[in-house]
Amino acid sequence: VCTALDNVEARLYVDQRVLFYRLPMLESGTLGTKGNTQVVIPNVTENYGATRDPPEKSIPVCTLKNFPNQIQHTLQWARDYFEGEFKQSGEDVNSYLTDPDYADGVQQNSKYETVVAIRKTLVDERPVSFEDCVVWARLKFETLFNNQIRQLLHNFPEDQVTSSGTKFWSGSKRCPKPVVFDLKDKCEDAQMRNHFDFIVAAANLRAHMFGIKGRTDEEYFVEVLQTVIVPDFAAQEGVKIAANEAEAKESENNTAGGMEESEVDQILSSLPKPGELAGFKLNPIEFDKDLDDHMLFVTACSNLRALNYSIPTEDTHRSRAIAGRIIPAIATTTALVTGLICLELYKIIGTPQKELTIEAYKNGFVNLAIPFMTLSEPTAPATTKAVVKGKEWDWTAWDSLDMNMGDITLQEFIAHFETEYNLDVSMISHGVSILFSFFANKKKLAERMKMTMSEVVENVTKKELPSNQLFLVFELIANDLETDEEVELPYVKFRFR
């Protein structure tokens, strides 16, 4: 299998298939001037999913919330806001309307914010017409790019000095300034009408969420916006704003309080009951960088935040590349990686008479910008020690317990492991479903024991198995019948057709 994939999720899926069918795989990837190749050979090298890259360094919360200094920060903030406002709030409302025990399942430290957001979406700010969506967008503009900035400056004035005597607004902390709404405004750097774009995009996304027909003609927006009454800003006392990452974490840990528990119950009791809104459902919006409506909102939102902090703005095309972490492909890197993969391909398919050892294969790592290139020996697969029938067995991710006995019953399946491997099976699972366990309901177990393995899977998962599926994969927990010690086993590859 020679892959040419562009994301880790797809690579991991193909890796699982390759492990299952025990096929060699040639995996490669490029990122600008960087490239890598990996050879995966059954029982010789480790599989692709055996090692993972360390997670990318994330932007500190306090930087995103209050102290951005790069366009990447404002774009990430805009994306997070999109997710919370148009996806999470819709999903929360739908869960509340469909799940009677919704409140019990919400995480304690975010329960208050969640129910407040549900009340806002479902009651306080629920639109009935597109005009309501435009008004909502205009008030959001004022809150995000004017009022919040003025509150921040109220807490940390421009001339604020820290305990060590240095200016608070210095170094990477840029002193913000509120943005005053002006429908005709056009930013100098990107030449974009961010004020107008924000209102149009936000109103239309809001309308789509509530199933209201949107519109984009400028005359309509000018007309509606003239009638919007924007409340005057009044600074709030006692508002705590985290000045650094440590304070941000501390305030996050302190959000769940006893006083809020009673408030949560009060808010929940004031919400309309799901029965009163039978059939009502929101359309949560999943962000997609390739959809122009989504990118228009994120770009305008990011640019307005950038204007708050005197950061150069970017147009939609550049913002899409930054938000989607798009690094243009370079033909020379692709050609080099293709060449390296072809060299390994010759070794696999061109030497049928010869059994190649791990030393014959090479993984490649290149960076044409430095320039740097190195070839290394692949890593051997990790082994797990198991004692089966008194004998030691070092198995790897490539191994499985293959069963080709037809669609036997659950009782016969368990008996097979007792007689063949001298093992007492205490649990059998298929994916996330538990098919058999020693602590399960005895009546249910007795029923399942007489069913075939495919019937048990269909019964538990409530899904019919496709007619072209030949195998089922089971994970077992089993103990040695003589020593009563748990034995770690590879998965069971069960052919039922």
Image (cartoon, helix red, strand yellow):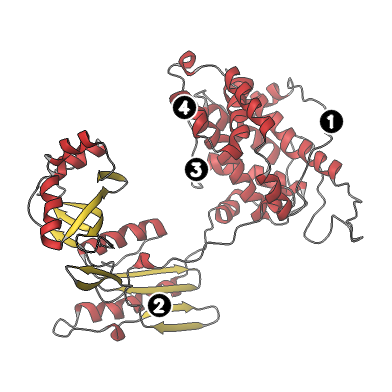
Position in image of residue 158 (x %, y %): 89, 49
Horizontal arrangement in the rendering, residue 4 relative to residue 456 (left or right): right
**What amino acid is found at the position of numbered circle 1 in the picture?**
Ala
Position in image of residue 197 (x %, y %): 64, 37
Query: Mark 2 or mark 1, which has the lower sequence index?
Result: 1
**What amino acid is found at the position of numbered circle 4 in the picture?**
Asp
Front one among 304 and 462: 462
Position in image of residue 367 (x %, y %): 50, 77
Front one among 52 and 354: 52
Q: Mark 3 touching mark 4, by CB under 8 A?
A: no
**Mark identifier at residue 101:** 4
Q: Residue at x 32, y 46 (%)?
A: 432
Quadrant for the N terminus in the image = bottom left
Q: Residue at x 74, y 39 (%)?
A: 145
- Could you tell me how far apart the alpha carbons at marks 4 and 2 are, in whole angstroms? 56 Å
Q: Residue at x 50, y 78 (%)?
A: 368
Residue 68 in view here: no
Query: Mark 3 or mark 4, which has the lower sequence index?
Result: 4
Q: Residue at x 44, y 71 (%)?
A: 331
Tell me the SS state at disc 3. Answer: loop
Query: Mark 4 or mark 2, which has the lower sequence index?
Result: 4
Tell me the SS state at disc 1. Answer: loop
